[in-house]
Image (cartoon, rainbow, N blue to C red):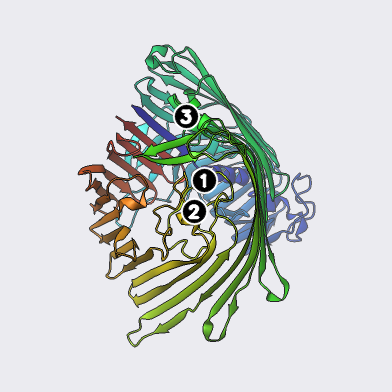
Amino acid sequence: MSVTRICTHKGKFKSALLGLGLLATCAFVPAAMAQQTELLPSNYFAGQALSTTSDLNFTAQTLTVLQEQNLIIATGDVELSAEGYLIKAQRVVYNRNTREVELVGDVAVRDPDGLVYVADKANLTGDFRQGLLENLIFQDEAGYWLSAAEAEIKPNRSLDLNDADITPCGTCIDENGREIGWRIKAVRIVRNTEEKTIYFERPSMVFAGVPIATIPYLTIPDPSLTDYDELLKARLSYSSELGVGIAYPGFILHDPRTNLTLTPTIFTNQGVLGQLDWSRSTRVTSVKVTGYGIYQFNPSAFAGKLGDRNMRGAVQASATYTPTEHLTIGGAYTLFSDRSFLTDYDVGDREGDYAVNRVYGTYLEDDSYIDARVEQYVGLGESGASNEAQQALIAPKIEASHVQQLANDWGEVRLSGKLIHLKRANDHATIVNGTPHVFGFEGAKSHLTLEAGWSKQWVAPGGLLIAPYLGARADVAQYDGASGYAGAPAADLVYNATPIAALDVSWPLVGTDSSGTKHYFAPRLQLVSRGGPTNTGITNDDAQSFVFDDSNLFSFNRFSGEDRQDSGTRLAIGGQYNADFGNGRWVDIVVGQSFQLGGTNAASVANPNQTGIGSGADQSPSHIVAGIQGAPFDGVTLGAKTLIDPQNGQVARGSIAGKYTTDIFSAGAFYSYAHQSVSPGATQERHEVGGDVRIFIDDYWSVGAYSNYDIADQSFVSYGSDVSYDDGYLGGTIYYNRSSANTLDPKDTIGAKLNLKMIGDYAYDYDF
């Protein structure tokens, strides 16, 4: 049993608070620079420490100088602008004796980013760096809204807001007068720039007009002075071994470059897990180190497992160096007390059941790409050691590509290359009903691939598109033959050269009939000849996925990696038809087939990975691939794909789906089928049917349910239901899901999700 609950927070709040800080420092900069205008007395702003180099624009209907009171009064649509800031008010009064400025009536400030601050009245002192604003309203371009009855600007850009209110949608009232979204209310909000904190006094959270919770106070790091996304990650969890876990981050040090955060997690069955995050960033570097540690009070909860010990912990470190906008160098490393710690406590950076140690460098431009890396996949969990032994250590993998456009419209030349060396401690294989499926052989293997190609597209009379391709590929591969698995290759060193020639011809035809229907039809023919062998890498480590459909029918090489390639001469024919009937009604049809004209059909070559076998491309003529999708009626969408054996007309693989949507409900259904021949080792056909329905209770509330049923096994694969709310600013779901024993991850799950626009996403789920 396990529960996972993750919270992430976004940075719009950062913009608002930073913008208020700019208001304190910069909102009235133009007044401080008025020494450059002749409208005011000379030396009027003498002694000001602010910029004197920018142009100032000053307009008002009337300007009055009261010499006895030493006052300057501007009235009537007063505007000050400089350095991208625009300030407006109906009346501005400046007291030269006290150095105070008063702005009254429709006070508004727009900063260079277009953010606008509005108040009824503003009183500024201390060279305009201190003051009081009444009825302040701030709203950014995304709709984030912060208001306060009073906003006091203190020295060093600190802010003290009274009776403050924060929302993502202005007043958050919809067209029917209903309150939507979320709202945080606080009696007082204090932004302390010296301590780099934001303090909330009696904050309360309101969801869609309903008060949810109120706490006495809350202190968080200042999001405008640090990385808010990385700081606030509250966490709630549960498992039978750990009990209930509650975590909330505290902070020790935060400034624009360095962050140090302590996050204790209290587990009812094991004690306190400490998490210490340290990060430092500069213009070109970023370093992060995270440490975890716990003294388990009840290690016997993990009896017989790796976690049966008192002291447990881990350290993860990562770094990047970006000397230019095109080049990034980085790395990551993980250490732990035991392989199960990160998975038991559900912490740390992981890729599935692995932690990845890596060093890499990437160079990227519009027409060039280079990536070099070393990677070690460290197995986690109780089976981590055996899983790691089956994963390859990659040291190194180097990939590069470059595209060069030729002069005088003579097409383009594409250059690419890849070098990889990997080493695997154990064979990684399984047997399905007597059919072996090998994912990797024990031993060390190296493979270098270089490829160059030229292509150009001509438009012939009548709109015929002709695109020739000429290229060549070279491969060098070496394998040490360490595997003793049946069918494993012996030690070998091979050199291969593959000339490549292709011609792609298509004829797009467009027309409109008398009813106004727009038609598009494009027959296509492609001839590809590859002169090299199919098994270029000795062992196949990166080209094991092979699904033949309309997406790769016209690919020069239908294999997914460099260890295998197409071979021989192949002809592919097909076409696409699209009709637009208007009023949102349309249909799109794709159909095609390939023919092996000479040489070896790579997809039909027997191999321990079973790559290509049963795909439909392993025959000549190949299976026919076809797909259709469209919207025949308002609210209805339909789609289907199929793979048909032309020798007997049998459907080898197929699926059909449809959906109907109205203002009241939506409903969908699908059926999928696969003949046992498409999956080597399968003993029966696969038939699966499923559907989903959602009923819209009102504009924001809905209930839904879904199910998938395996007809052959006569059992449900999965099913579930949910109740959801979404107004565009506040969203939430309570759900139940069940996946059956014949899936990869059988379990029952109940959970809840919450989305607060501009703050973050929260999720809680419980597996049993």
The disc at residue 218 is 3
Mark 2 and 1 residues: CB-CB less than 8 Å, in contact?
yes
- Please tell me whether mark 1 sits on a helix, a strand or a loop: helix
User: Taking the image as drawn, is residue 708 in sight?
Assistant: yes
Give the residue type that dot 1 points to: Lys
Does 681 sit above or below residue 80? above
Image-based side of 751 in relation to 29, left or right: left
Quick one: label 2 or label 1, which is nearer the N terminus? 1
Q: Residue furthest bottom?
A: 514
Mark 1 and 3 residues: CB-CB less than 8 Å, in contact?
no
Give the residue type that dot 2 points to: Ala
User: Taking the image as drawn, is residue 163 in sight?
Assistant: no
Q: Nearer the viewer, residue 333 or 29?
A: 333
Query: For residue 634, which quarter of the picture?
Result: bottom left
State the separation of the CA atoms marked 1 and 3. 19 Å
Name the spot of residue 750 as percent of width and height, x first.
29, 35
Query: For residue 271, which quarter of the picture?
Result: top left
Q: Which residue is mark 2?
A: 142
The disc at residue 12 is 1
Image-based side of 575 in relation to 461, left or right: left
- Please tell me whether mark 3 sits on a helix, a strand or a loop: strand
Name the spot of residue 56 as percent of width and height, x first.
72, 58
Give the quadrant of the C terminus: top left
Give the quadrant of the N terminus: top left
Q: Nearer the viewer, residue 392 or 109?
A: 392
Give the residue type that dot 3 points to: Leu
Q: Nearer the viewer, mark 1 or mark 3?
A: 1
Q: Nearer the viewer, residue 224 or 604?
A: 604
Crowd around label 1: few <14 · some 14–19 · many ≥20 (10 Å): many
Could you tell me which residue is drawn at 54 percent across and 51 percent down?
564
Query: For residue 332, which quarter of the picture?
Result: top right
